Image (cartoon, rainbow, N blue to C red):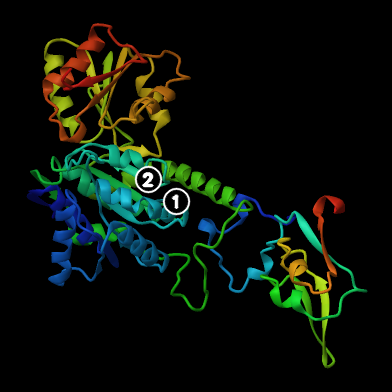
Amino acid sequence: MPVKLTVTGAAAVAHAMRQINPDVVAAYPITPQTPIVEYYAGFVSDGIVDTVMVPVESEHSAMSAVVGSAASGARTMTATAANGLALMSEIVYIAASYRLPIVMPIVNRALSGPINIHCDHSDAMMVRDSGWIQFFTENHQEAYDFTIMATKLAEKENVLLPAMVNLDGFITSHGVESFEMLDDEVVREFVGSWNPKYSLLNTKNPVTYGPLDLFDYYFEHHRQQEEAMKNAYKELPGVFEEFEKISGRRYDFLDLYKVDDADYLMVVLNSTASTAKYVVDQLREEGHKVGLVKPQVFTPFPKKEFQQVLNGRKGVVVLDRAMSFGKEAPLYSLVKSSLYEVASRPSLGSYIYGLGGRDTTPEMIREAFEDALQGNLIADEQRYLGLRE
Amino acid sequence: MSDLKGWKDIPIGGVIDKPATAREYKTGEWRIQRPIIDREKCTNCMQCWLYCPDMAIGGGLDGKKMKLGEVNLDYCKGCGVCAAVCPVNAIEMKSESEFI
């Protein structure tokens, strides 16, 4: 029977990893990811899992060890945040290029500087083109569930791509909340065993990983990665369906909250969606037809789903917890471009919020909604919530 | 490079799934000059064979003496080391455009 646990988000993710019981976890602790690998190291030292834990001297080494381990055919995981991800980034691209189905929770934190350890999404956005599948999660339950689903998806034969599960630094990772944990056997059966096609340790069929790949084949390998992303998009509904069978929880590319008859929609990632839902409820009570769209899958970007849900609305506000200096904000630019071909485009507004852990209050969310309600949206104007002028 | 395969026909991730295939990888594609050996001047001293950074210059024992073989253009990058070390100036680097 599933049990209710009231723990931190980091513990929830560590429990998902424990139930998956990967062969290898190589990690370097970095705030606010540290408790995930601390909990996991505890499971290893207590003999609860039979994972080989590799404590390394930096994140660059963590991702390098993970790539080596996954290439050898072991089911492999790690976790990181912000500057740790930045230090990994060289190898992050390599993991995707070698088509290694690594799963990595990212505890979202601002990429300095000046030095900041609190939540925003600049770390995830930095690697958005690295070829990893990217999930975003609102709370403990989703962080736990998506860690399990990510493993299932990444290892599909026609996918074989690494996957990141994003959760908000401190807000989700350190906040205590209840979530429902599935039985160990149920999770084990869901993810199944991992049988890689290629293994560095298979001496009967020796392979080489990472050879020189110049102008003659590099392009073709990248085209393969694009195809794998398309396959991930096609496989995801099946994964959601299978997960619903074991958990009763139904996920989709987009989490839709009160959108059916809504004239005005907000798009926002991760934990801020909870605050936004609260504001949606308030505005609904006041008679405004508003709703919320929370992307659960960011890469592959669910363009078709966005087109379907945003087409014909009066106004859409997109909130980004990261900036693309000199360009449109990352989530906003994707949402905007997805609307190029819809029959009836809504008016659009771009809002930056919550950088470096800046608290995001219902009043701020309301401010963005009110701009939409008053017809005061300018597609090419970037606005800021909670910024002092 | 006429036998290059499309993206659907190659192993994913650049994995090489058969051992000892390096010889199949032709590395002479970016050459802009090629060595032309004047056999009348050549003394078979084998300096070019010895100094070639790849294995583009063929040759070996012919009876009891060493004898220079052909240049394998699949692997010659046109670096010109062979021409530079030749003590009798028997090797001339000629532009690839002359052979189109």
**Amino acid type, callout 1:** Val
Residue indicated by mark 1: A159
Tell me if I can see residue A366 in this picture.
Answer: yes
Check the residue under mark 1 and report the chain it is in.
Answer: A
Residue indicated by mark 2: A133
- Mark 2 near mark 1, Cβ–Cβ under 8 Å? yes
Left or right of A143, for residue A65: right
Question: Toward the viewer: A259 or B27?
Answer: B27
Left or right of A328, for residue A198: right
Question: Toward the viewer: A10 or A352?
Answer: A352
Residue A140: % across, % down: 16, 44
Q: How much space separates mark 2 and mark 1, taking CA atoms? A: 10 Å
Question: Toward the viewer: B81 or A128?
Answer: B81
At x 28%, y 46%, the residue is: A165
Does dot 2 land on a helix, a strand or a loop?
Answer: strand
**Amino acid type, callout 2:** Ile
Neighbours of disc 2 within 10 Å: few (<14), some (14-19), many (20+): many
Q: Quadrant of the C terminus of chain A?
A: top left
Check the residue under mark 2 and report the chain it is in.
Answer: A
Residue A267: % across, % down: 28, 25
Mark 2 vs 1, N-terminal side: 2
* Pointers 2 and 1 within a single chain: yes
Q: Quadrant of the N terminus of chain A?
A: bottom left
Left or right of A210, for residue A86: left
Tell me if I can see residue A280 in this picture.
Answer: no
Residue located farthest toward the bottom when viewing the structure as drawn: B64
At x 78%, y 72%, the residue is: B86
At x 41%, y 30%, the residue is: A303
Q: Is residue A68 above or below residue A217?
A: below
